[in-house]
Amino acid sequence: MKLPFLHKSLFLIGLFLIQTAFSQDDKHYPEFSWDKVPVAFHFGKKGDLLTKKEAKFIALHSNFTVLEKAHGFPKYKYSEETIAADAKVLKALNPDMKVVFYWNAFLDYKMYKAHEDYQTKSDWWLKTKTGELDLKNERIKRYDLSNPEVRNWWSDVAKDNLNNENIDGVFFDGLVQVTNPGNKKLWGTEKFDSIQQGLKDLIKETRAKIGNDKLIVYNGIRSTPVRNSENDFPDYTDAIMIEHFGYFNSKSKESMLKDIQEMEKAGKSGKIVVFKTWPENAWLSKKFMAKSEKEKEEISKKHLTFALASFLAGAQKHSYISYNWGYRLSMGSLQWYPEFDKPLGKPLDEMQVKGWVLTRNYEHASIWVDLENKKATIDWKKES
């Protein structure tokens, strides 16, 4: 008579062990090297899959890529299928490549097949404290992460896509939107707190389903005056994106220093860090986007030294830079800079901070950054 209870107990014990066994090792990480500047790709291609030339370029220049929502859209309907298709292509070209599946943890994007299922579950849609739908831009539904059924569905979608041998991880996006303190007025304090806990539970529950050999990447840290998340989600995750260094609401010297320090802190804790930085321009600028591709490239070259030196000031093992002006392949993702091919070598010391000036030395480069005046130099040592 006790046998069913025993079976249930053993299952719960097993689930607990899976959840608690995760440790921060790097056996399942992309292979890391200080030989040259470590670069990560993060993009979706609008309208089609990667050409052979594009795929070869990516596979040659990095071993860490996140494929975004709407990859191949609208020619191809579902992001699950297009991400899987190009993951296969990239892995064939570079077996050491880690390809990560973008799956927003808060927003219901219509270009996913999973969206069609979510559309049928009206009790899963997040609502304000007045009972109205909480929509982004008055059209995109949000997930109510306080609901265990929503989390179970979301983590099942992640698991199903990561069962593909060519997909190595899942990219949790939207976390800073969940944690925005302004949501307390929208949802009420009790609901806000339950959603914050639900987000942490979602990460833990996803880890339990996908196992320890797949990557969980989350976005992330945004060091602004009202949204300094300070690596709030370390448990059960492998990687973090610092998304807006030096641009949008992260332009202040205080925000930039905090971002660099958070990269350093997360890296020393054993995490992969993708340091997303911008060439003082982004796709939201109509004036910039109206320029020719050559003009955009020249502007980006002009701003590269500050972005790259800031990254190198705090980079740790498994840190990667991502430098372009948007999240589409056409927005500078395939621009390459001579500095990325220069010998770098291992860091010889830790970042030194004196006021707003940062310095650091590598085997083949010396770094100087002035955050207050947004100036920097990289002294590339001549090869012997």
Image (cartoon, rainbow, N blue to C red):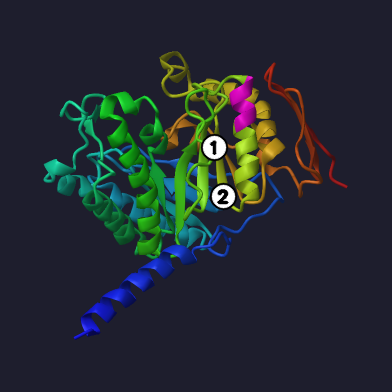
> Does residue 125 appear to the left or right of 316 in the view shown?
left
Provide the residue span drawn in magenta. 253-258
Q: Give the vertical position of 100 relative to 329 (above or below).
A: below
Quadrant in which residue 219 is drawn: top left
- Where is residue 188 shown, x and y percent of the image? 28, 29
User: Is 318 or 381 nearer to us in this picture?
Assistant: 318
Quadrant in which residue 199 is drawn: top left
Q: Residue furthest right?
A: 384
For marks 1 and 2, give the CA distance: 15 Å
Q: Amino acid at mark 1?
A: Glu
Can you see residue 70? no
- Where is residue 49 shown, x and y percent of the image? 35, 46
> Does residue 4 appear to the left or right of 41 in the view shown?
left
- Nearer the observer, disc 1 or disc 2? 1
Q: Main secondary structure of the magenta part?
A: helix
Q: Residue tagged by mark 2? A: 272
Of mark 1 and mark 2, the one earlier in the sequence is: 1
Q: Give the vertical position of 202 relative to 374 (above or below).
A: below
- Where is residue 263 shown, x and y percent of the image? 61, 40
Which residue is at a point 34% across and 64% down the rendered structure image?
163
Which residue is at a point 37% across and 73% down the rendered structure image?
14
User: Is 58 or 293 nearer to us in this picture?
Assistant: 58
Q: Amino acid at mark 2?
A: Ile
Which residue is at a point 17% across and 26% down the rendered structure image?
130
The label number, if any, that marks residue 230 in the structure image: 1
Q: Under tag 2, what secondary structure?
A: strand
Q: Residue furthest top?
A: 287
- Where is residue 46 shown, x and y percent of the image? 34, 37
Can you see residue 309? yes
User: Is 260 or 47 nearer to us in this picture?
Assistant: 260
